[in-house]
Image (cartoon, helix red, strand yellow):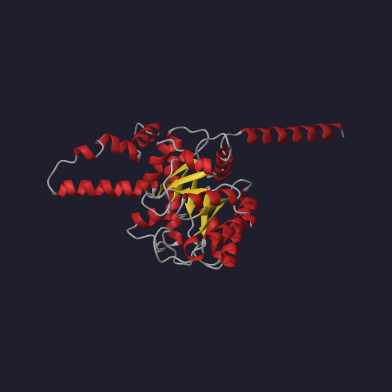
């Protein structure tokens, strides 16, 4: 009896030690890491929001991580663009999941090369309308979660959706929009149950109803999204600073500001956005637009027979950016004499 008591006591103590050790581990699942960042940037004494330069492939993800940003966002506009299409939902669910996997690889490659003890930076991924009905939405959340995404954005546009700052978009009914978000939240919770707490992608619920249904409808949708459990909200394309302020005042929880240069929303400094109440600031097209401009300039120089040295990196810098430096280290590590 005594031996059994001692054995049981040792097993309990061992379990407690293991649990305590895990709780101290700096490596968190991507959604848990994102949640911690949102809690940090929600504090009043933090003077700027979480900055999210947007990526769209493995290279852009690498650049953001190498620039030491704390998080990123995979933009559907960018994924569509690098595949040669406009952001009008011509890209399918499978293509978006494939892009998410590529982004995750890019982020993890930088973390591995830098020996980051906390793992790769988290990424929120554009889930568009969920690619079908509410059951499709749940499948999309699971697919993005398995791809390593920390969060997923689900919106209320009619499919096929389009960029929130272009004409021709429309939204589903209020009730359908809420059910779409509820399905995403249910999938998040089911993912947590299957794979462990903190593994389910956080849900960023977006509404595009401002243009067609009015500002009050957009606010009502964001409030309803929060009531069914979304982690973050995104009221797309507010047209005035007053609307931005009103949104931040009336809707609870973390909020995203979309800083699309030359779009419909006023571009404000990060400090002003944080003072309003925004927790995150996304820069959806900055990298894509900058790369297009650089390519156009380079092509013009080539076409005119002019040197391109002033507009490009050195070959060594280019090799380093795409990962040759890390590759050489790994290659040498496993080199054999035969």
Give the residue displayed 62% in from the left and 57% down from the top: 186
Looking at the image, residue 224 lies above or below residue 322: below
**For this rendering, which residue is in front, 143 or 131?**
131
Give the residue displayed 81% in from the left and 31% down from the top: 6
**For this rendering, which residue is in front, 121 or 234?**
234
Q: Residue furthest right?
A: 1
**For this rendering, which residue is in front, 37 or 58?**
37
Q: Residue furthest left?
A: 305
Quarter occupied by the C terminus: top left
Res 278 seen here: yes
Quarter occupied by the N terminus: top right
Q: Looking at the picture, how far across and down is residue 65, in whole percent?
A: 43, 39
Give the residue displayed 16% in from the left and 47% down from the top: 302
Q: Looking at the picture, how far across and down is residue 37, in whole percent?
A: 55, 40
Q: Looking at the picture, how far across and down is residue 319, in whole percent?
A: 30, 38
**For this rendering, which residue is in front, 42 or 136?**
42
Q: Residue furthest front?
A: 242
Residue 302 lies left or right of residue 101; in this view the side is left
């Amino acid at each position: 009896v005594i031996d059994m008591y001692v054995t049981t006591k040792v097993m309990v103590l061992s379990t407690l030690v293991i649990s305590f050790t895990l709780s101290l581990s700096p490596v968190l699942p991507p959604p848990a890491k994102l949640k911690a960042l949102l809690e940090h940037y929600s504090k009043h004494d933090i003077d700027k929001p979480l900055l999210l330069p947007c990526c769209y492939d493995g290279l852009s993800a690498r650049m953001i991580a190498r620039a030491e940003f704390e998080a990123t966002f995979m933009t559907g506009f960018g994924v569509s663009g690098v595949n040669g299409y406009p952001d009008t939902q011509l890209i399918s669910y499978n293509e978006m999941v494939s892009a998410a996997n590529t982004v995750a690889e890019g982020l993890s490659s930088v973390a591995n090369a830098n020996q980051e003890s906390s793992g790769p930076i988290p990424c929120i991924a554009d889930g568009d309308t969920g690619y079908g009905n509410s059951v499709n939405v749940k499948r999309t959340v699971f697919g993005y979660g398995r791809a390593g995404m920390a969060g997923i954005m689900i919106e209320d546009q009619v499919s096929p959706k389009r960029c929130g700052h272009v004409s021709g978009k429309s939204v589903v009914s209020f009730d359908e929009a809420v059910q779409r978000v509820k399905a995403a939240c249910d999938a998040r919770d089911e993912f947590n149950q299957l794979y462990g707490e903190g593994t389910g992608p956080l849900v960023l619920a977006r509404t595009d109803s401002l243009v067609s249904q009015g500002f009050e409808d957009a606010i009502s949708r964001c409030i309803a999204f929060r009531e069914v459990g979304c982690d973050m909200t995104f009221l797309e394309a507010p047209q005035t600073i007053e609307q931005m302020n009103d949104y931040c005042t009336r809707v609870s929880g973390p909020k995203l500001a979309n800083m699309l240069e030359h779009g419909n929303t006023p571009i404000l400094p990060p400090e002003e956005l944080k003072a309003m109440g925004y927790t995150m600031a996304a820069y959806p097209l900055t990298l894509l637009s900058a790369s297009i401009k650089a390519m156009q300039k380079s092509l013009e120089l080539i076409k005119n027979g002019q040197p391109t040295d002033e507009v490009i990196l050195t070959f060594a810098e280019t090799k380093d950016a795409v990962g040759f430096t890390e590759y050489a280290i790994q290659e040498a590590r496993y080199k054999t004499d035969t």
